[in-house]
Amino acid sequence: MNPNPTMSGFSSAITMLKNRRVEASAPCRVDSGGTWDIRSMALPMEAIEPVTLNIALSLRTRVVLLPFEEGMVKVSSEGFPDTGAHEFKSLPFDSTFGLFYAAISCFGFHGLEVRIASDSPSKAALGGSSTALVALIKALSKLAVLTGKPPLPQKDILHLAYYLEDSTSSGKCGIQDQAAAVFGGVNLWRWQFGSRRVPYERTSLLDRKRQQDLSEHLLVAFSGKSHVSARINQGWLEGFLSGKTRAGWIEANRIVRRLAQSLAGCKWERAAGFLREEMEVRRDITPDALIPVTHKLIRQAEQAGCGARFAGAGAGGSVWALGEKKRIQELKTIWRSTLAPIRGAGILDCWVEPIGVR
């Protein structure tokens, strides 16, 4: 008879982790056409082929698995208060680290500690929590391999990451953050949630050499102000579902497609123009995405002949700019001066990351 029936079917990670280090990492992203990756927006509008463009960044999030107490799980992350350890049989999926507890529960491991560290600032609107989740799933898959299970392929990691996050967010989660973290590179994603096979079609826009070229035309900065995407996205969804802002969303989708075509052709100045166009539509349909400092940064980019946009749901977080090399270098000086008085703000030293989760 099992002395602890509540742990039946689950596995202790202590022995497996005692003499080996299991870790994984994944890149964060900037994006254009975000929010269309939320199922309740994209599914009713499949006729217009909703898309999101994202660019993976070299700012990676790293996850390390370590042995811990039998029957217990602990998760810690830089920039967040220590929440202590929890019993595996009652992991709080609705807590700060609930998303990660859900992933650990899904794999059925206990007796482990998860440590998360990121190259990007916390709550910077660069897809941080989703990136950490993808890295954690990869690490847990590596741990599962030690028990004789096959490793999870990329598509399965994305599938699991999206549905775990969607289930713990009551169906209001998008999939683009996890997608960028899994595959890396520069991609245009067409959302097709009505498909029985996969909810997306991925088009890689640039090979590695051209991704290096794009890095010289790209600038990313953190405003020093953290954001909370769930609250912002809820308002945008309400406007879309009611029909009040839908026409604007459709126009933004058209612009993002043209932006993707320009990037694929390495037409940087033209691409910057389309980024300005999308931002103009976003000012109308998502005005709460901008706070004074990000509004100023984007205006400075536009005045310098570049295009710029808030990352993710905005309302703080990061902004990114695109333009000719000379203009980007000039903008870097301008942004650095603007952000200098703001604690924690500054230019983020990064480039396009061709490699996804590993």
Image (cartoon, helix red, strand yellow):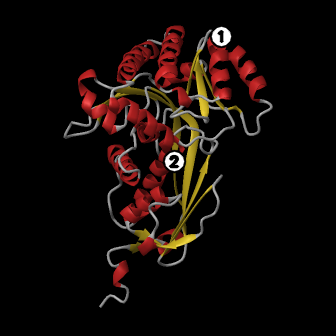
**Amino acid beneath label 2:** Ser
Instruction: Give how far apart the Cα atoms at labels 2 and 1 are.
Output: 33 Å
As drawn, which residue projects farthest toward the right?
Answer: 341
Q: Which mark is residue 303?
A: 1
Q: Which residue is mark 2?
A: 129
| Mark closer to the chain start, 2 or 1 | 2
Q: Position of residue 163 (x, y in %)?
A: 34, 49
Residue that appears at 33% across and 33% down? 41
Indicate the quadrant where residue 264 lies. Answer: top left
Position of the N terminus, as image quadrant, is bottom left
| Residue 12 seen from this side | no
Q: Which mark is residue 312?
A: none
Q: Position of residue 153 (x, y in %)?
A: 34, 47
> Mark 1 Cα within 10 Å, few/some/many (few <14, many 20+)?
few
> Mark 2 Cα within 10 Å, few/some/many (few <14, many 20+)?
many
Residue that appears at 33% across and 83% down? 5
**Amino acid beneath label 1:** Gln
- Which of the pair 285/116 is nearer the observer? 285
Name the front one of labels 2 and 1: 1
Q: Position of residue 295 (x, y in %)?
A: 63, 23
Count numbered badges in the picture.
Answer: 2
**Left or right, residue 318 beside residue 252:** right
Residue that appears at 32% across and 57% down? 150
| Residue 57 seen from this side | yes
**Left or right, residue 172 beside residue 14:** left
